[in-house]
Amino acid sequence: MFKYKKDPTAKAKRLSSYKPGSFLYVVNYVSQSKSAMAGFCFIALLLILSFLTPYIFKYGYREINVRMQYALSSLEHPFGCDEVGRDIMVRIFYGAKYTISIGFFSTFCAAICGIILGAAAGYFGGLVDTLIMRALDVFQSFPTILLAIAISAVFGPGYWKVILACGITGIPSYARMMRANILTVRGSEFIEAAASINCSTGRIILKHVIPNAISPLIVQMAMGVASAGLTASALSFLGFGVVPPTPEWGAMLSTARAYIREYPHMVMFPGLFIMLTVLSLNLVGDAIRDALDPKLKN
Amino acid sequence: MRKSVSKKIMALLLAAMLLITLGACGSSEEPTEGDTQPQETLSLGEQNIGAEGDAAASEQIEYVSYALNSASFDLKPFSSPASGRAQTFQYVWPRLVYLTSYGGSLEEAEMWLAKSVTRVDDVTCDVELYDYIYDNKGNHITAEDVKWSYEMVATVGQSVEVGNLLKEIQILDDYNLRFILNSPGTGKMETVLGFHRMAICDKDWYENATEEELLSDIATAAPYYIKEFVSGSLVVFEAVEDYWQKDESLRGISGSQNVKTIYCPVIAEPSVRAISVENKEVDFTDIQISDLGTFYENGAVKDGYNMLAVGGTTALDLFLNMDEESGSPVATNLKLRQAILYAIDAESCRIAAGLDDSCSWLCYDFGTVQMAGFNEAWKEDYWTYDPDKAKALLEEAGYPDGITLRFMYTSNMSSGMVAVLTENLEAVGIHVEVMGYDQALYNTYKYDSSVWDIIIDNKGGYSLIDNYNNLFSPGGYTNGGVNFCKDQTLYDLVDKGMLTGAQEDYDAIHDRTVELAMGRGLYASATIYVSQDGILDMITNHYMYPMVNAWTYAEDFVSNYKIN
Amino acid sequence: MIKYIAKRLLQMIPVLICVAILIFTLMFFVPGDPVQIMLGDYTSTPEQIAETRARLGIDKPYWEQLVIYLNGIVHLDFGESFILGNDVGEELLERFPRSLTLALSSLGFIVILGVPLGVLCALNAGKLLDKILMVLTLILNSMPTFWLGLLMILLFSVRLNWLPSNGIGGVEYYVMPIIAASVGSLANITRQTRSSMLEVIRSDYVTTARSKGLSERKITYGHALPNALIPIITICGSYFGFMIGGTTVIETVFSIPGIGSYLVNSINSRDYPVVRGSILFIAFSFSVIMLVVDLLYAFADPRIKASYAGNKRKKKETAETGADEQPAAGKEGT
Amino acid sequence: MAETTLEKKTFLSVENLLVQYKLSGETVYAVNNVSFTVAKGTTLGLVGETGAGKTTIAKAILRILPDHSLKGISGSVVFDGKDLLKLPETEMRSYRGKNISMIFQDPMTALNPVKTVVDQIAEGIALHQNMNKANARIKAIEMLETVGISADRADEYPHQFSGGMKQRVVIAIALACNPDLLIADEPTTALDVTIQAQVLDLISSLQQKLGTSMILITHDLGVVAGTCDAVAVVYAGEIIEYGSKEDIFDHPMHPYTVGLFGALPDLKKNVNRLSPIVGLPPDPTVAYTDSCPFAERCPHVAPQCREKKPHNAEVSQGHFVRCHLAGEIAGKAAP
């Protein structure tokens, strides 16, 4: 009976077949690290559940049942009910897409602006560099929370405004990192080579400089999603976050904090899920960083 | 194989870590099953003193600590009302008359700086001062200082209500004044003479006092002065050595000095305030309803604590936009307004805010049931919750397939209550655009009729008619009443009510507001104070703030506070 | 070096002016009228509103107010708080030490704990200890601060009664806030130390050091760590800057009257002078910290110090290396 | 390994050294039971393509192989009568830098960028000759002068030196405590030709002066000719030919050694194409326990080469070749 012996090195071979740093390589590498996969599945599961909640669960995320106020976890309500009798589990799953999407969108727009600013500052240097850097200093000297509060105070609370607030406050760190990478890459030969065959500066930046300086940024973005999630929940804690009844985890936590002594389950589950989501995002971020930065692999 | 073993160990470790944190904060005894039968009613108004009733301390006790709930305040004589200074103001700044109970009249009031008060007619009143009033820095307080103080409170102190009521103050001689009101009305004179934010101080001292002195080294004729003031963190009051009123019998509540030093640390986070009492770090503080369970269980205060629940001065009211020109559909459509009011279940709003009969009351008018002038008859048919009737009214109003309305509130209001309100309206087909703004934005948009259709706000006053006057007096608002309503008959009724103070006039006002369907009162919640068990009697002033200086303490009272 | 510091200090002034103008404009256009909040709920007649606006000076047009404000800043007069009426400058000076103690001690906490942890992880990378530490710091990093703060109060002060639950005073008051504030960033410092140490451990000069017969400990702390310092200093610098103004949540939970809570309360009540004053204060301390971080770079890495020393010394070097090469000699290999 | 006359004079003898790494799940057979000896005061050249395991042998002797990727190490390295592989780490540390020291390939990264040059030299001296800091510094400055760097540049940092100067510092570090054995791992590869010659002269002059024996690792046959007494040709982690310089240069026996010389441009012969060795270097993950690693690329490959491991035959006095056909092809390939 022919027994197919699983070739232990098959995976390693498949992995090394891709060009290190290429998208496929990263995807392949991440899928091999167990912890990253655990994190990734957790987030994927949450997102799927979040979109499916209206169909799978009996209770709607807004459905109020004042009789079941503060109900402890029971079969009916695995995570118990909040101060208005709404099922916490449904709200957590439904709210998952808010916290996670806030994290992704704000990091994404922060990274885009950061990269452009950083690249311009790093590559052109001189006046452009000092101007952008000083502007970033001005931005960065604002505490993140304050900038977010000022923005949501100006535009009023709401989902997109929180994303705008978290996004804008993220720009300086990405720009600074991009500039640092550019400075190291700018000096190297292949840039001079590209310049010698008179590529336009724009092409040089886009084609050569950014791809090489991108890997630490992607790692920063993976971590950034986690911290943006936390900023959003801190914003809701201070009362500037998402408007009820959207079940964003930070808002749930801030309303439940008053009941921490009497009904700890209301605080416990949102806090726990924020922690697990941020943990999974960090695990995935770690794997991406290891994939992109071979030196740190083993 | 070895790799997966380490994974298992890590998973175990992770789980153990979580259990510890979960265990740490679960309340010690098994939390009661999630039944929601209301706890035993905590009798409001009077105190709920712990078991033992040992003898009261004969002489002044050393010190007591009272945790304050807001950090942004100062105790300068004349400062804007927004800062949270009401809790401790009456220890350090005297006023003419001390009103003993909420809504109480001048006749029952206790004399403080005033020796005697005689009503001349329904707008004028003569006040005679003691002639031996000296503050702790030896300045002599005369009629001229009192008149100047009133002007300062109305302007720098921005206490507009005093400014509106008073026509003029005449100085008869060094120790006699005549107060003349703009218009007669029950309770107006009480408000002026017993004004809870009044501060009477020496004119010369104030004019050349430095910023430092104004803040933490004041000259006052009150029983206590400020020994230490750390802004936003701690205030310490010390009893004045030779208080000017030597005659014990005349001191009463306002002048008593039962405790030598009062330490008032500021603890802004409500759940931490409750913890600091339970943890024996402070003696007394106000707690939020959700922490009630830590000190109060199935009808009795747990031993080791005392409980005081006071309230009824302000109610949570819901208003509908009545400004025809604002373009809001609500303003011009009576049926729509009625549909909204019938769709709201005030009872579940109250429960959702974490309140129940033990610490709150439903409202059957814009004022509270405790306010003087409330008529029990109003309780029968006051917008009883009837979703079907609301749906029918909505169709009659011309919106069979629903309408979207803008609902505004401030983000520090109970989100549970907001959730119930929005669900009630959604259930009958009224979609709600929820606008939860921070305090500053809310205060600005409140007076702008183009921003909101439905608004909820905390309103209150000294009495029912005082509340109506605050809500609907044309003088007070630039664009009609609190909800831009410009109904002349309502204004006339309110003015008449102010004059006569008769119950029929109050009924007429109430019925008019119901007829116009301009809004409704939802509920009013009590403020709950908790203290260690060494305190025997907890007196509060007419605005229900604790008069710590006038309490009776047990013989063996020892404060929990660690002075550092 | 002094010339460099002077240059940086001069550069700081335009940044602070920009911050002042930016925050002034931001607060000017933020909706919400401070006078409405100050007068509170009571019915206020239009004249009273107008009179208060005049007294506070916010009825003047934008440019006029900006000029008054900037000239005030130049004389270090931050004006008076609308709500409290006391001088903002003094208040900030009174509150600054508390935020500073919180920031400094929690920075100390994460460096003293984070760096050795990072080195430990780097030394046995891939082993079980490394994985456990990484996941543990990740968990701590993922906990929302206010949740952690409340849990710690419940555990340490209520259940175990070791520490006071809030307020300011002796050392024991600062223990929990510091831990709650810094635990989150512990993960960043540990991970950054780990990755830069991993990079350094594999470099050739560490092998040279080992070939000299030095002990492992001396190699790690004598040769490897000094080279891994630069990225760690960057993280500490940005963390410290964040801590000065960003500990609002910690200050609210532990009722520590620092600059963070003072700032958020003033935003809530649109107390313009306080908001402007605190922001400028935070911006100033942030720029000073950035300067200190850059100086630390020079101290930690001679290559950067050389670039600060200016061109004078550079010319001397290039001339020298050229002359030293001895003429080529030695027999030609077959 | 047959007893040889050099026995009593040898002071370093390596007996079937075996080193394996693990690289993401696979085992790399870097060194496959290598044996050789180094006589006092002589220089042994280790020659071979890159990746043949030369550096691993050197690092194994000094026991500074990176332990996180090391799978296994066995065999014996007898130095002055003691087997270094069995020594406890603390005792081994006293050997490193004092009795055996090493020069590395890339001077650019071999020096610690944040420490001054003189400190890096003084560190070893202070440790092994237990002097206080001041004397160690004086000794270090003397050392700098011996390698041709002026004293006033002692307090400068590595980034202020050119490649050649840095290599001089590395040499100064290695020879600071005049070790008995110096291992030079391709000391001149990263330098251009003119500097290369100077560095080699410096090393050999210091070697004469201090009487240090040396193991020179290189893939440049010209360098070997100039400095080495004995030569070992390394291929796929094994020594396939070992002998004195004359044996190897004048009559190479192993086809690989012959191929190496074939690939050298020779002024005397006007050959228009060099004859490179065909094929690719061996796959390190294969152990070649029962075949000759050079079999695929060997022009004279015979059936037994693929079935049996060639033993180490002594074709002439002190000249060993690990090849089945060692005898026959000698005649044909001679130049």
Image: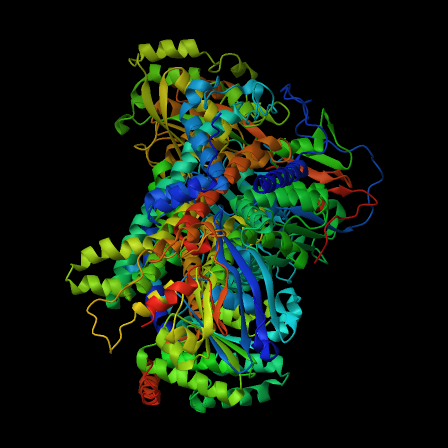
Q: Quadrant of the C terminus of chain C?
A: bottom left
Residue A152 visible to an observer of this rendering: no
Task: From the viewer's side, name the closer residue of D312 and C64.
Answer: D312
Please count the marks in the image. 0
Q: Quadrant of the N terminus of chain C?
A: bottom left
Q: Residue at x 65, y 32 (%)?
A: B292
D225 w.r.t. C109: above or below: below
Residue B209 x %, y %: 53, 64
Q: Residue at x 64, y 46 (%)?
A: B67
Residue D289 x %, y %: 50, 52
Task: From the viewer's side, name the closer residue of B456 and B461.
Answer: B456
Q: Left of B241 or right of it: where is D164?
A: left
Residue B284 x %, y %: 69, 43
Residue B113 x %, y %: 63, 49
Farthest-out residue, right: B55
Residue D75 visible to an observer of this rendering: yes
Display coloring: rainbow
C277 w.r.t. C270: above or below: below
Task: From the viewer's side, name the closer residue of C315 and C99.
Answer: C315
Q: Left of C308 or right of it: where is B71?
A: right
